[in-house]
Image: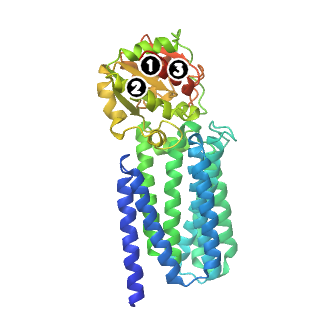
């Protein structure tokens, strides 16, 4: 092996190590930002080394980098936190279509493929196509450009099974004679694009956190296959890491909902009609800002439970400010995070990190539930399904069996909501009618600002 080849592979090893360390750091909110930077440095090193190794014409590459960087910069500054899940879905889709185009371009460059490379090229194109159109459907559901509910169509399982069988047959035919079967490769691409739509559109909006993490895994697997096609070791490693981490995250999301991945993908959750226990269940007890202030002012411990409504109202900064005022009053403050709260994995963690909430105040569901009986006040901000006690108590409920943050066991529950409309799963919340619950209606940001004014006015 030449000296230059050794230097390139050594650089790739360093990049791979940076990816792994970066992923490890992403497992903790305290180190996540640094982990993201470490991984980005690893990718920059890999890109620069690859460009030098190939001796390519830099004009178009530099132009692409400038355009891509500009888009990323604008997105980072302009996209609201409420739209972050949609942006993640788009990025997953772009990653998938990049792998598809890479495999397609390599086949155009060199159609004389070995059997193994023909198979992985087909896999890269097929998985990349699924990721692209599936992510576009997820984007549409999250942004409500298309109905977020599960869209069930007649014979969907038969159609999806037929597509998978067709893809396997086409892959076998293509691998046997890739030089003369360009049309078969195009068919693989086309059916992958169709399968991305037919596999995601029957999934309801409440399951989008799982879908996003699964599509993220798909984008990694497509990139890994593309790495084999072009013979690039670092692309293989990076794709494998993304694919594996995405699968692990998907498993965590499914566990948080007490459902299997097959149930998420094939059950059509969200199209289910409401059970008898999913409707209104009593009278609510409304509260004013002054009422809530007196409850919070007397509390020794307060747990905030954020949900998608926090993101919609952009109330993360005022929530942190209220938390600071409570701490100054001698109150223990916690932020209880459900794994699937929001529209994507880690949505609430990202929101609270943006507001500089101390990391040691973030408490996971499994850690807060055992001590919930001793919590004086739970403040539920825009969360619904992840705090619904029907998941524990009502076997007729469509979310029965899903682990929740058991806010109903706290001494007092304050629920901030705009109205009594149900959550993303489309069912009513029994918590709202509990004896220890008070409903504080209004925009979450304005409601919390009113509480802050009450605290400051009492000084």
Does 328 sit left or right of 275 as displayed? left
At 36% from the left and 54% from the top, the residue drawn is 25
Are dots 2 and 3 in contact, CB under 8 Å?
A: no
Are dots 3 and 1 in contact, CB under 8 Å?
A: no
- Quarter of image, res 56: bottom right
Are dots 2 and 1 in contact, CB under 8 Å?
A: yes
Does 419 sit left or right of 395 as displayed? right
Mark earlier in primary sequence (3, 1): 3
Element type where label 3 sits in the image: helix
Q: Position of residue 395 (x, y in %)?
A: 45, 23
Picture quarter with the N terminus: bottom left
Q: Is residue 151 above or below residue 197?
A: above
Q: Position of residue 129 (x, y in %)?
A: 62, 60
Residue placed under numbered mark 3 in the picture: 450
The numbered mark at residue 325 is: 2
Q: Nearer the viewer, residue 44 or 276?
A: 44
Q: Position of residue 156 (x, y in %)?
A: 64, 45
Picture quarter with the C terminus: top left
Q: Nearer the viewer, residue 20 or 114?
A: 20
């Amino acid at each position: 092996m030449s000296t230059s080849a050794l230097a390139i592979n050594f650089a790739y090893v360093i990049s791979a190590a940076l990816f792994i360390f970066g992923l490890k750091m992403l497992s903790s909110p305290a180190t996540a930002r640094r982990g993201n930077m470490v991984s980005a440095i690893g990718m920059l090193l890999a890109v620069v080394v690859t460009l030098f190794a190939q001796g390519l014409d830099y004009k178009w590459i530099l132009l692409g980098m400038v355009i891509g960087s500009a888009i990323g910069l604008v997105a980072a500054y302009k996209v609201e936190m409420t739209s972050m899940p949609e942006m993640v879905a788009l990025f997953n889709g772009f990653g998938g279509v990049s792998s598809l185009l890479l495999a397609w371009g390599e086949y155009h460059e060199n159609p004389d493929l070995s059997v193994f490379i023909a198979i992985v090229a087909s896999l890269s194109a097929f998985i990349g196509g699924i990721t692209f159109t599936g992510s576009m459907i997820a984007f549409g559901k999250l942004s409500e450009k298309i109905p977020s509910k599960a869209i069930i169509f007649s014979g969907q399982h038969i159609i999806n099974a037929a597509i998978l069988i067709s893809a396997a047959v086409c892959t076998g035919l293509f691998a046997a004679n890739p030089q003369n079967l360009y049309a078969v490769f195009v068919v693989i691409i086309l059916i992958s694009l169709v399968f991305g739509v037919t596999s995601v559109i029957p999934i309801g909006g409440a399951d989008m956190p799982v879908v996003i993490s699964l599509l993220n895994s798909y984008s990694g697997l497509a990139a890994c296959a593309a790495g084999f096609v072009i013979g690039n070791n670092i692309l293989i490693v990076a794709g494998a890491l993304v694919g594996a981490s995405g699968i692990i995250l998907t498993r965590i999301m499914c566990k948080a909902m007490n459902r299997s991945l097959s149930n998420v993908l094939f059950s059509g959750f969200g199209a289910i009609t409401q059970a008898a226990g999913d409707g209104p269940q009593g009278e609510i007890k409304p509260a004013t800002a002054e009422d809530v202030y007196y409850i919070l002012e007397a509390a020794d411990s307060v747990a905030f439970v954020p949900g998608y409504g926090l993101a919609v109202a952009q109330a993360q900064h005022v929530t942190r400010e209220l938390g600071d005022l409570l701490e100054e009053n001698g109150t223990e403050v916690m932020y209880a995070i459900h794994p699937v709260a929001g529209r994507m994995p880690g949505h609430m963690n990202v929101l609270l990190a943006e507001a500089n909430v101390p990391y040691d105040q973030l408490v996971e569901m499994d850690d807060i539930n055992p001590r919930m009986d001793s919590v004086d006040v739970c403040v539920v901000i825009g969360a619904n399904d992840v705090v619904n006690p029907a998941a524990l108590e009502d076997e007729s409920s469509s979310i029965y069996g899903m682990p929740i943050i058991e806010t109903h066991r706290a001494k007092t529950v304050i629920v901030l909501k705009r109205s009594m409309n149900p959550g993303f799963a489309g069912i009513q919340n029994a918590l709202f009618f509990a004896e220890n619950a008070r409903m504080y209606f209004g925009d979450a940001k304005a409601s919390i600002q009113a509480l802050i004014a009450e605290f400051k006015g009492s000084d």
